[in-house]
Amino acid sequence: MTDNKIALVTGGSRGIGKACAIELAKAGCDVIINYAGNEEAANKTVQEIKSLGQNASAKKFDVSNKEAAEKAIAEILEEYKKIDILVNNAGITRDNLFMRMKEEEWLAVINTNLNSAYFVTHPVSKIMIKQRSGSIVNMASVSGIYGNAGQANYSAAKAGIVGFTKALSKELASRNIRVNAVAPGFVQTDMTKDLPVDKIIERIPLKKLGMPEDIAKTVKFLAIDAGYITGQVIGVDGGLVI
Ligand code: NAP
């Protein structure tokens, strides 16, 4: 077994997850990135991590599918023998005003952004409990804290992630496992590329969008450095929620 910490980052092929994977690799972790379908992006991220001198691999599975997540995590354990860090990052948006929101849009977002936290964290936390160590960082959002019009599904899922983080941190603390969350504001990724940036920036006290690296540095801090922090939700939002 390697002495390096082993980190699993869901949705680690692009955007915020990719930046988290790279930041954890820079801190000496070997990283498994999960993705849904974009193999080219996943392979590129794996190569970038390997060029930093760390071991990396890509694991394709749908985080909203319980069986798929369980199978993938069993395979990861078989290969790597442990999981030290889990970043529950994979997420999607299906924005619509609630009156127009279709059931598929509601369910897709709840399944991918909230139920995935159960499907992935349940098997991983069993491993961490046996190890008597681990650190979990969940990706929340400002939308889960202040609610965003047009995002009832997404805000509900992210608020769920906040509650999940706090409850799980209390359950797992005695096993030396910390559970925290990051709540990003608006971050420059594929997810936000079609939003009206100028209008959004007016509302942000720091007058700029966040970069994936801004979120990743906080994730790395919580995952590795913050040995006495658990159950916290850290806003990384340019002052959007004050
Ligand atoms: P992104 O650029 O769209 O990347 C999404 C990542 O998640 C990709 O790696 C994608 O894989 C993966 N993914 C999507 N559905 C999946 C599924 N069912 N199973 C496995 N992987 C899946 O998104 P992002 O902006 O980086 O967002 C990352 C996280 O931060 C999300 O939880 C999001 O809600 C949260 N967040 C983002 C912002 C923002 O402004 N961007 C703000 C607050 C919170 P493929 O490449 O294979 O599609």
Image (spheres, rainbow, N blue to C red):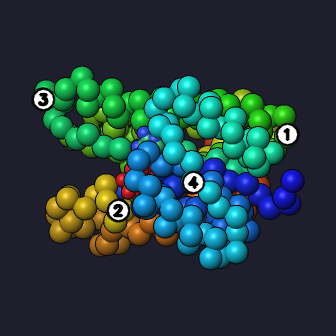
Q: SS class of the residue under badge 3? A: helix
Q: Which residue is mark 2?
A: 189
Give the residue type that dot 2 points to.
Thr
Residue at figure coordinates x 42%, y 61% from the top left? 40
Side of 199 relative to 147 (left or right): left
Residue at figure coordinates x 62%, y 32% from the top left? 71
Q: Reading the chain from its start, which is encountered first: label 4 or label 2? A: 4
Q: Nearer the viewer, mark 4 or mark 3?
A: 4
Residue at figure coordinates x 26%, y 26% from the top left? 104
Residue at figure coordinates x 86%, y 60% from the top left? 3
Side of 138 relative to 112 (left or right): right
How far apart, in angstroms, are the residues tagged by discs 3 and 1?
47 Å
Q: Reading the chain from its start, which is encountered first: label 3 or label 2? A: 3
Q: Which residue is mark 1?
A: 132
Q: Which residue is mark 3?
A: 100
Q: Position of residue 182 (x, y in %)?
A: 52, 52
Q: Is ligand 1 within 8 Å of the beta carbon of the residue shown at mark 2?
A: yes
Q: Which residue is mark 4?
A: 58
* Mark 3 and mark 1 residues within 8 Å of each other at the beta carbon: no
Give the residue type that dot 1 points to.
Arg
